[in-house]
């Protein structure tokens, strides 16, 4: 999943039915182009100048996003979304932080979003025992693991009924979410430079190609939990005020799916359980950040301290959804009691509202 540009797994759902002759001309491009030249020469007649009446688009308005193709629309939203994100490190405790500064505010302040501390090398070595044990599940999960190597849209679709023909803007919002995850996770992976399990033992023998970037945090886990949290928030925004929101109803299945996608990477032999745990935290925080930028709400600073991710006697700890992420201190997962505003991103807000309409 990490490192893939765009959402080819999603765009493949649409099939462009009925538009095959218009979508990128393919191998017949030269023939079609020559035919268009001949066709114009036959029908154009004497040139009469500009005679169509068009409305001039407004200057710098979010609604102009409706005019653009999917790729440029998402790129415009992405540049707005990452504007103001700042990475900071401290070498003493080997700590890295993601901060945000609203560059459009009159009083620019840096506000913490995520704080990470990596496990120690001895902890990773202990985690290797868990990775070796998970290898026993490879025969049972091989089909899932291979299907989830790219971007497993079909899995999310099976939970919430996501379809290409009804939820085009939702797919674009997920594309934006994916791009944000890769942008952030790759920087953290570089900072911590954690080795993969295969580097620690010749007996791990991963069943898929080991990615060419750091192990901690897990990109698959980050992206999976970001999708789970974002879809839940989106569905809740679209639900009627009476009754239980649809996102809340889907919470358990979305979280279980994210956890299974993350764990399957451990089964495959390319990640440690602690990678998944950190990815869960990071993906949750990034989805909350995107939703807050779209809706003008606030976020809690979140943190993960890998040094605390172990049992009471120092034994390796497995990843589990039962581990609370809401402790204020003293645990691997932390969540600040207070909230902080991250401003409003008008372009992201436009895409969010268009996606909400698809579920109303």
Image: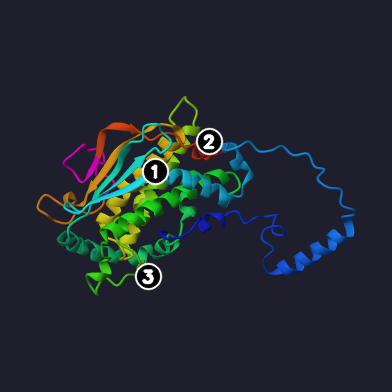
Neighbour tally class for label 2: few under 14, some 14-19, many 20 plus, Cα within 10 Å: some
Magenta: predominant secondary structure element?
Answer: loop
Give residue 267's quadrant in the image. bottom left
Quadrant of image for the N terminus: bottom left
Q: Is residue 205 left or right of residue 235?
A: left
Does residue 162 show up?
A: no
- Measure the C-alpha gap from mark 1 to mark 3: 35 Å
- Measure the C-alpha gap from mark 3 to mark 2: 39 Å
Residue drawn at point x = 82 percent, y = 43 percent: 51
- Measure the C-alpha gap from mark 2 to mark 1: 23 Å
Instruction: Look at discs 2 and 1 and give the one toward the viewer.
Output: 1
Q: Secondary structure at mark 1?
A: loop
Mark 2 / mark 1, whichever is N-terminal: 1
Quadrant of image for the C terminus: top right
Residue drawn at point x = 35 percent, y = 70 percent: 207
Figure check: 23 above or below 356: below
Q: Which residue is mark 2?
A: 353
> Residue 256, position in %: x, y?
36, 48
Q: Is residue 352 left or right of residue 228?
A: right
Q: Is residue 66 left or right of residue 97?
A: right
Residue drawn at point x = 31 percent, y = 59 percent: 190
Mark 1 / mark 3, whichever is N-terminal: 1
Q: Which residue is mark 1?
A: 84
Residue drawn at point x = 19 percent, y = 51 percent: 309
Neighbour tally class for label 1: few under 14, some 14-19, many 20 plus, Cα within 10 Å: some
> Residue 91, position in %: x, y?
19, 54
Q: Which residue is mark 3?
A: 209
Figure check: 73 above or below 7: above
Give residue 36's quadrant in the image. bottom right
**Magenta run includes residue 34:** no
Magenta stretch, residue numbers: 320-334
Neighbour tally class for label 3: few under 14, some 14-19, many 20 plus, Cα within 10 Å: few
């Amino acid at each position: 999943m990490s490192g893939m540009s765009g959402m080819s797994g999603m765009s493949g759902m649409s099939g462009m039915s009925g538009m095959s002759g218009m979508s990128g001309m393919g191998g017949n491009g030269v023939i079609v182009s020559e035919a268009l030249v001949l066709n114009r020469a036959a029908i154009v007649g004497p040139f009469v100048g500009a005679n169509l009446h068009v409305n001039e688009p407004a200057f710098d308005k979010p609604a102009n996003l409706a005019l653009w193709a999917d790729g440029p629309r998402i790129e415009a939203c992405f540049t707005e979304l990452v504007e103001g994100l700042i990475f900071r490190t401290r070498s003493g405790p080997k700590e890295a932080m993601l901060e945000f500064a609203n560059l459009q505010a009159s009083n620019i302040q840096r506000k913490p979003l995520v704080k990470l501390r990596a496990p120690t090398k001895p902890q990773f070595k202990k985690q290797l025992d868990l990775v070796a044990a998970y290898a026993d599940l490879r025969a049972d999960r091989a089909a899932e693991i291979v299907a989830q190597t790219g971007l497993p849209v079909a899995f999310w679709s099976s939970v919430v009924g996501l379809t290409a023909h009804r939820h085009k803007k939702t797919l674009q919002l997920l594309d934006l979410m994916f791009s944000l995850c890769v942008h952030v996770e790759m920087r953290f992976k570089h900072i911590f430079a954690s080795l993969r399990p295969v580097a620690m033992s010749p007996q791990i023998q991963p069943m898929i190609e080991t990615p060419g970037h750091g192990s901690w945090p897990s990109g698959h886990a980050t992206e999976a939990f970001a999708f789970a949290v974002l879809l839940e928030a989106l569905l809740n925004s679209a639900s009627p005020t009476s009754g239980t929101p649809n996102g809340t109803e889907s919470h358990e299945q979305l979280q279980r799916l994210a956890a299974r996608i993350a764990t399957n990477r451990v089964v495959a032999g390319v990640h440690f359980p602690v990678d998944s745990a950190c990815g869960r935290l990071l993906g949750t925080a990034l989805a909350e950040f995107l939703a807050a930028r779209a809706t003008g709400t606030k976020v809690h600073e979140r943190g993960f301290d890998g040094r605390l991710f172990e049992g009471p006697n120092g034994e390796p700890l497995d990843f589990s959804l039962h581990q609370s992420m809401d402790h204020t201190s003293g645990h691997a997962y932390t969540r600040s009691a207070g909230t902080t505003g991250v401003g409003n991103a008008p372009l992201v807000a436009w895409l969010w509202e268009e996606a909400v309409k698809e579920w109303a």
